[in-house]
């Protein structure tokens, strides 16, 4: 059991002042007189964030997120009615009361950054903004994947919902509750809601429709658009704060005559019942800085309390991709296990937990395609892969028919030859490879820049043989070129290179470019300004990942 201290009379908090949430007991208390205690039995996870008035019972009752019965929550209100603050209060209350092994928090901030303060809580895996489209896609994809994983896990174990699983499982095997806080639905709709013809909104509705039973919960704030859209039908729990038009309360099933003319910030009314509720601040200082400081204090205490929680039980991260990163910095982030192969090469950094990614050309068809328009950074990516091979003792054959930074590798002791013409003699190329005597233990990689120039070169037959049987001899190929011309046509050695079904697209301008690396690319992922440093990487596993390429 824990006690909830509620101070002040009903008339005191009707005066328009926020309740104050006390860190000592984790609940709201108004500034006034006449305190009384209300107790809640908590054999399950509970977070308190306000007080509701029950005049018929001459009583007040704490408003809580009780995960035994909680599904999702929607809070509608006009700007500056206290919507964002309620999300911060709920997050801080849950963080103060429960371990980061039991509750994981995620934020999607489509407003002015009010949720950024939640990153100071160890419970928070990520707070993403509406301008971080790629990061939001990753977060929603992870939540959708977690939904499927949990459904399978509960079904296999014979549990009906997460409550049964947590009651039966050992402490270190209990599934945590995942709470996703989305601030300002009206900011989501015209931005993230339009991505890929509304696919993110569709995935969000799936999470709301199926997630509550497996412990994935949504708390969404917004204006009247939240209360009238199709998403409004996905939960029964709603509150209305001050709305631009009092008649909008009818969307909550509350007669307009039951709503006062003046509604102060933080005052809300529960749908259907019209129960008057006062939501809590986290500290006396009602400014944004004051509330952020209160969250920081909760976070510091929670960090100390949860210091022994293992990484596996903490929330998954959705890291921000760096705008720029050097090769040396990216090389340090590589996966040590994956990069043990001599034919592994660094292409870029990405992933939810920032990691260096690249192909292992010792596996599958020994080819990798780098494609993009002019000035998209193709040669830079090719150079980074060449540096990766050289760092691991691999020998190279370079073909650079046009001006390229790869020509600077001429004279390096591990570079067998740098071809700079617009043709490569077949006999010369064959003799060069035979003299090198490549094996899987002492491989040779052929790196080709501006590959479209060499599509019909004299050594075409040798390139074709390399792609078809190179893995047996310790040979591999990396080719870079313009997305419109490289690996084009219906036959030839470059068409064979596409059969590896792996590569990277840099600032692609046409959805058909996905064929070069073995994936389908939507129209929403192509076009726009050419911006070196970002790419869509496919390693043959069916997953398209956005990465930052080293410069």
Image: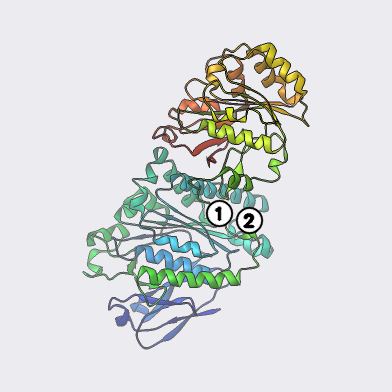
What residue appears at the point 60 percent right and 48 percent down from the top-left corner? 149
Tell me the number on the disc at residue 94.
none
Image position of 536 with respect to 118: above or below: above
Q: Is residue 487 visible?
A: no
Please identify the quarter of the rendering in which residue 475 is found: top right
Question: Residue 174, located in which quarter of the rendered image?
Answer: bottom right
Residue 228 at x, y percent in the picture: 32, 52
Q: Mark 2 points at which residue?
A: 159
Secondary structure at badge 1 equals loop
Query: Which residue in the structure is indicated by mark 1?
Result: 317
Of residues 504 and 230, the one nearer the viewer is 504
Q: Which of marks 1 and 2 is nearer the N terminus?
A: 2
The residue carrying pointer 1 sits among few (fewer than 14), some (14 to 19) or many (20 or more) residues within 10 Å by Cα, namely: some
Mark 1 or 2: in front is 1
Q: Is residue 354 above or below residue 83?
A: above
Q: Determine the residue positioned at 60% across, 72% down.
A: 305
* Residue 405: quadrant of the picture: top right
Where is residue 287? Give x, y as percent: 35, 71
Asked if residue 529 can be seen in this view, the reply is yes
> Badge 2: how crowded within 10 Å, few (<14), some, or many (20+)?
some
* Residue 402 image offset from top left, x and y in percent: 52, 22
Give how far apart the Cα atoms at labels 1 and 2 are: 27 Å
Q: Which residue is drawn at 58% across and 42% down?
A: 327
Total number of numbered labels?
Answer: 2
Closer to the camera, 526 or 375?
375
């Amino acid at each position: 059991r824990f006690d909830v201290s509620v101070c002040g009379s009903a008339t005191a908090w009707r005066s328009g002042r926020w309740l104050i949430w006390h860190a000592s007991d984790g609940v709201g208390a108004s500034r006034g007189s006449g305190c009384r205690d209300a107790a809640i039995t908590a054999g399950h996870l509970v977070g308190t964030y306000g007080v509701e008035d029950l005049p018929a019972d001459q009583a007040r009752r704490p408003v809580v997120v009780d995960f035994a019965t909680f599904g999702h929550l929607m809070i509608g209100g006009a700007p500056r009615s206290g919507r964002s603050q309620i999300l911060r209060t709920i997050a801080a209350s849950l963080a103060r009361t429960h371990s980061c092994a039991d509750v994981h928090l995620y934020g999607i901030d489509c407003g002015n950054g009010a949720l950024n303060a939640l990153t100071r809580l160890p419970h928070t895996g990520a707070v993403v903004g509406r301008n971080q489209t790629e990061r939001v896609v990753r977060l929603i994809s992870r939540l959708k994947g977690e939904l499927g994983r949990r459904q399978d896990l509960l079904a296999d174990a014979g549990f009906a919902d997460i409550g049964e699983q947590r009651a039966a499982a050992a402490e270190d095997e209990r599934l945590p509750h995942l709470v996703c806080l989305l601030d300002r639905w009206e900011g989501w709709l015209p931005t993230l809601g339009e991505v890929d013809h509304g696919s993110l909104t569709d995935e969000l509705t799936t999470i709301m429709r199926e997630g509550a039973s497996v412990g994935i919960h949504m708390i969404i704030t917004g204006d009247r658009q939240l209360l009238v859209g199709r998403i409004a039908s996905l939960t029964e729990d709603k509150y209305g704060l001050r709305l631009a038009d009092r008649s909008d309360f009818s969307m909550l099933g509350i007669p307009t005559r039951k709503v006062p003319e003046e509604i102060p910030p933080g005052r809300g009314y529960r749908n259907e019942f019209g129960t008057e509720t006062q939501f809590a601040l986290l500290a006396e200082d009602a400014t944004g800085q004051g509330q952020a400081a209160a969250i920081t204090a909760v976070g510091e205490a929670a960090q100390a309390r949860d210091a022994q929680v293992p990484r596996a039980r903490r929330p998954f991260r959705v890291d921000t991709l760096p705008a720029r990163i050097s090769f040396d910095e990216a090389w340090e982030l590589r996966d040590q296990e994956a990069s043990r192969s001599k034919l592994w090469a660094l292409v870029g950094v990405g992933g939810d937990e920032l990691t260096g990614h690249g192909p292992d050309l010792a596996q599958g068809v020994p080819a990798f395609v780098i494609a993009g328009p002019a000035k998209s950074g193709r040669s830079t990516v090719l150079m980074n892969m060449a540096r990766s091979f050289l760092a691991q003792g691999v020998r190279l054959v370079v073909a650079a028919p046009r001006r390229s930074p790869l020509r600077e590798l001429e004279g390096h002791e591990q570079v067998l030859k740098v071809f700079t013409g617009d043709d490569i003699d077949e006999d010369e190329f064959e003799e060069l490879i035979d003299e090198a005597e490549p094996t899987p233990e002492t491989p040779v990689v052929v790196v080709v820049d501006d590959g479209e120039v060499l599509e019909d070169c004299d050594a075409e037959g040798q390139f074709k043989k390399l792609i078809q049987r190179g893995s047996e001899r310790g040979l591999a190929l990396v080719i870079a070129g313009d997305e419109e011309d490289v690996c084009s046509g219906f036959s030839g050695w470059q068409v064979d290179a596409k059969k590896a079904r792996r590569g990277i697209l840099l600032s692609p301008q046409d959805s058909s470019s996905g064929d070069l690396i073995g994936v389908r690319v939507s129209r929403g992922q192509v076009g726009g300004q050419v911006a070196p440093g970002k790419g869509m990487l496919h390693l043959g596993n069916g997953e398209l990942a956005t990465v930052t390429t080293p410069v």
